[in-house]
């Protein structure tokens, strides 16, 4: 399988030949930053386009189809439009916090984004507590949303932010516990190790019942965590206009929008990494020729393909279920998901301790 | 190396937001209008301040969250070593968990999980 470390080593060797030693590291860091930004922007644009197309097809419409072939350039032009809109600051906002909020939201989502192992050797931050760091980093985003709602000096924003805060912290428990259930099975928190230990079978097959329950809970909680689908009541447009980003305009709003879409991808990518084998190709024991053919497909396509399926499922939720009320939302989390999750954790521990997994 | 990369990523995020907002401020048009500064609320001038007392229900859930989140932090180190710790570790952690689950059951019985 193609290892991306070859590319990075080649770049490193070339830079060492061209530049004095003290400049090499700096240049590499700048390159990492640029690559990260490009990946982030392309991911966000692709996801916005996909969302609009998928949502259109669910409603028997065509979606964007005028700008460029199949409307591919539409989202790019929309981003440029957003860039040249005026940034309005209304009276009596808390200016410092109002301007700080987009920074925090973007930092949180970019940190989580950089932890994801996209392919063999293609990940930026690889801590030995990787998955734990990912949960920690992505939960900083809540602070940004609360700040945005609080600083806007608008009642809609405040209610939206409070709902968002209550929802995100509640569902973070389910995310944390379902990830914990998988960590019991993997025995490691390093994302690259987690992926590599799935070479002989993905964890959703290895962990059978408890892994599947954890996956379903993770997907529900992940949808709620990104304020999407049936759980989008922080920005329920019929009652709160736009929730916490009502007063944000132009590029200020654009960052919340982009972060929301990339967070959806991060949820999908973590689900892929933990349950569906990350960038590992599909192997069926005994079918040697089949496994050989699967190995020829580059790992990044495996990863992006699996994530795309997850993203599609999350989008599917949105068009299938009606929006929940806040009391139903909290009941679902605290009275159903949390007890089920704790039982599931014990089930997984029994499976691991008594070696019942594959 | 990882920590340096962490700082690089944070700086990248700050640069992304800062540069894009800077460009937006330069290229975007500006117009001045007194009504523009009003809060976006139904078109009528807004009454009172928005920074006011708020429903305590959210606070209750925040406290419950704190309890279980700290629990999760304690469980992660154990989760990594479940295979080595075996049944002994399981019994110890069970004791810890039962106390927390009793807490949840108490909150449930008291009606703290109802949204009023």
Image (cartoon, coloured by chain):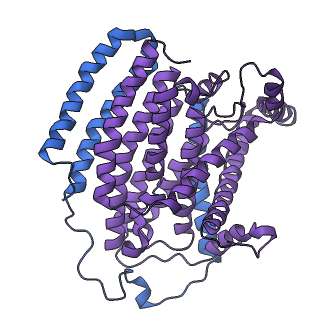
Using the image, determine if residue A353 lies above or below residue B49: above
Using the image, determine if residue B111 lies above or below residue A57: above
- In the rendered image, residue A42, in percent from the top left (x then y), is placed at 70, 55
Residue at image coords 38%, 59%: A147
Using the image, determine if residue A153 lies above or below residue A127: below
The reply, left or right, for residue A18 in relation to residue A243 is right
Residue at image coords 23%, 30%: B100
Q: How many numbered marks does the figure carry?
A: 0
Chain B's colour is blue
- In the rendered image, residue A348, in percent from the top left (x then y), is placed at 43, 23
Instruction: Pick the residue in front: A306 or A23.
Output: A306
Chain A's colour is purple
The reply, left or right, for residue A321 in relation to residue B112 is right
Quarter of the figure with the N terminus of chain A? top right
Can the viewer see residue A291?
A: yes
Q: In which quarter of the image is residue A203?
A: top right
Can the viewer see residue A115?
A: no
Q: In which quarter of the image is residue A232?
A: bottom left
Instruction: Pick the residue in front: A64 or A204.
Output: A204
- In the rendered image, residue A37, in percent from the top left (x then y), is placed at 67, 51
Quarter of the figure with the C terminus of chain A? top right
- In the rendered image, residue A58, in percent from the top left (x then y), is placed at 61, 65
Instruction: Pick the residue in front: A217 or A90.
Output: A217
Residue at image coords 81%, 27%: A290
Residue with the most extreme left position: B110
Residue at image coords 22%, 52%: B59
Instruction: Pick the residue in front: A332 or B12.
Output: A332
Using the image, determine if residue B95 lies above or below residue A212: above
Q: Quadrant of residue A13?
A: top right
């Amino acid at each position: 399988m193609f290892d991306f470390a070859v590319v990075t080593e080649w770049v490193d060797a070339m830079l060492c030949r061209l530049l004095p030693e003290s400049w090499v590291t700096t240049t590499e860091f700048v390159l990492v930053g640029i690559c990260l930004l490009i990946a982030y922007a392309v991911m966000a644009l692709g996801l916005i386009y996909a969302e609009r197309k998928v949502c259109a097809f669910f409603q028997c419409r065509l979606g964007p189809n005028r700008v460029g072939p199949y409307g591919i350039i539409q989202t790019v032009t929309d981003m440029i439009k957003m860039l040249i809109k005026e940034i309005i600051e209304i009276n009596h906002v808390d200016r410092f916090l109002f301007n700080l909020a987009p920074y925090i939201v973007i930092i949180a989502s970019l940190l989580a984004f950089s932890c994801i192992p996209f392919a063999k050797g293609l990940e930026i931050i690889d801590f030995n507590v990787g998955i734990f760091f990912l949960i920690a980093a992505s939960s900083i985003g809540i602070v940004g949303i609360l700040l945005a709602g609080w600083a806007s000096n608008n009642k809609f924003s405040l209610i939206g932010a409070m709902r968002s805060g209550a929802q995100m912290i509640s569902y973070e428990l389910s995310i944390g516990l379902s990830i914990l259930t998988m960590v019991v099975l993997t025995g490691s928190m390093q994302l690259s190790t987690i992926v590599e230990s799935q070479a002989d079978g993905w964890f959703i097959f290895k962990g059978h019942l408890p892994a599947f329950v954890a996956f379903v809970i993770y997907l529900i909680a992940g949808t709620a965590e990104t304020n999407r689908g049936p759980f989008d009541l922080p920005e329920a447009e019929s009652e709160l206009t736009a929730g916490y980003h009502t007063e944000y305009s132009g590029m200020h709003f654009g960052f919340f929008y982009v972060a929301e879409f990339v967070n959806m991808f991060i949820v999908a990518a973590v689900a892929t990494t933990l349950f569906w084998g990350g960038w590992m190709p599909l192997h069926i024991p005994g079918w040697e020729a089949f496994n050989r053919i699967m190995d020829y497909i580059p790992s990044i396509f495996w990863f992006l393909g699996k994530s795309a399926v997850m993203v599609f499922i999350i989008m599917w939720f949105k068009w299938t279920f009606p929006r929940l009320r806040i009391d139903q939302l909290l009941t679902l989390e605290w009275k159903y998901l949390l007890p089920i999750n704790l039982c599931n954790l014990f089930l997984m521990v029994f499976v691991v301790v008594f070696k019942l997994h594959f | 190396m990882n920590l340096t990369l962490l700082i690089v990523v944070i700086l990248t995020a700050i640069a992304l937001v800062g540069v894009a907002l800077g460009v937006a401020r330069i290229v975007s048009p500006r117009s001045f209008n007194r009504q523009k500064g009003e809060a976006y609320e139904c078109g009528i001038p807004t009454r009172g301040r928005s920074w006011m007392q708020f429903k305590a229900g959210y606070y209750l859930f925040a406290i419950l969250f704190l309890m279980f989140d700290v629990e999760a932090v304690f469980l992660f180190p154990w989760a990594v070593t479940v295979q080595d710790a075996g049944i002994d570790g399981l019994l110890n952690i069970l004791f810890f968990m039962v106390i927390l689950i009793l807490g949840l059951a108490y909150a449930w019985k008291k009606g703290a999980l109802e949204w009023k």
